[in-house]
Amino acid sequence: MTTLTDRYHALAAEGEITTDAAQVAALHVLEEVEKALLATAPKKRGLLGRFSKPEAPTGKRGAYLWGGVGRGKSMLMDLFYDHVPVEAKRRVHFHAFMQEMHAKLHEIRKTGVDDALAPVATEVAEATRLLCFDEMQITDITDAMLVGRLFDLLFADGVVIVTTSNRVPDDLYKDGLNRNLFVPFIETIKDRLIVHELLSETDYRQNRLTGAQRYFALKGAEARAQLDAIWEDLTGGENHPLTLTVKGRALEIPRYHNGVARMRFWELCGQPLGPGDYLALAGAVRVLVVDDIPELGRSNFNEAKRFVTLIDALYEANVQLICSTAAQPEMLYVEGPGMFEFERTASRLREMQDATWGQDAD
């Protein structure tokens, strides 16, 4: 029988991936999860299951892989997901899953039930033995208050969970509102999942950008084609929306995958966003792709001010910026109030084009 590690080394031999000792160590963790999953019989469904006493699975119920961005966590989880011979499995971005849970809770509460979460968790468990989450991060108080009991119910129903995260469990929902209520969930993670840090020294996503052009003074179809190619390379063409909650307001990122986000200039700077929004964005992404930055000046002064704030937030957070613009940095803002102040922004834009920009982050 071909093991997960066998499959990994076969891909390396084919030149699809590069062998990494830290990734191989993580594979052994995932193989332990696979053994536990296959050794546990599926929960009985239907009439017999309804009247039988469910077994309460004990011990570890999955894995929590964490580490810096670009270390291969998502690749390993995808490899594991494809390899495990279980039909009742699902791979989903953590944020998308939580949005789905909130929507289901909203509908069930309309029926007047006392505990809406129990039937939601049961529905998930009946369809899924293995849940794979990409990028667990908690930024929303509503998620923080929900996720602990949800995971307890899923574990009790025999669901195995594998998740990736850029944060050690103790840093989840760090400095969040009423975080003391969230702390028991952190203990649940450490108790029920194998917590494993991916200690690779190589940022493989960073290497994709090393030496690559990042600032395109182009317009129209040519600019879109250049950014489309970079987006495809960084994300494999996958994307989904991500919602950040900033002081009770929703900041929508329409295209996001594995730490890489893409937005148009007018989505970022054409709406009344402030420093808090841009700081939240800079904290949530590692690479930001921005389309269609126009010439700035008197006619779009408010948008230009927001753009300055955005660049400051990205610069301070070491976020890599890839963008298409109407002009080179020094010619982007050529008239109107704020020209002198924009010189610093132009300088930062120029610095952020360097091939080594952001490599010291994390």
Image (cartoon, helix red, strand yellow):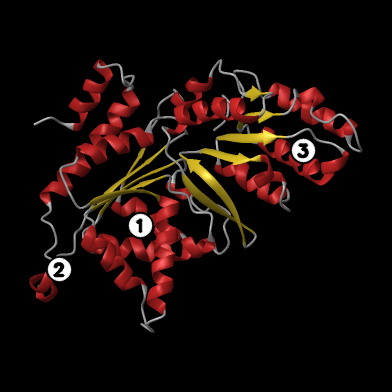
Name the N-terminal-most of marks 1 and 3.
1
Label 3 sits on a secondary structure element that is: helix
Q: Dividing the image into 4 quarters, which one contains the C terminus?
A: top right
Of 47 and 192, the residue lying toward us: 47
Secondary structure type for disc 1 = helix
Between circles 2 and 1, the one closer to the viewer is: 2
Q: CA distance from mark 1 to mark 3?
A: 42 Å
* Residue under the image location 24 percent in, 50 percent down: 89
Label 1, on which residue? 188
SS at mark 2 in the image:
loop
Q: Which of the 4 image quadrants contains residue 335?
A: top right
Which amino acid is tagged 2? Pro
From the viewer's perspective, is residue 90 above or below residue 9?
A: below
Residue behind mark 3: 308
Q: CA distance from mark 3 to mark 2?
A: 58 Å
Residue on which disc 2 sits: 54
Tell me: 3 left or right of 315. left
CA separation, marks 2 and 1? 21 Å
311 w.r.t. 86: above or below: above
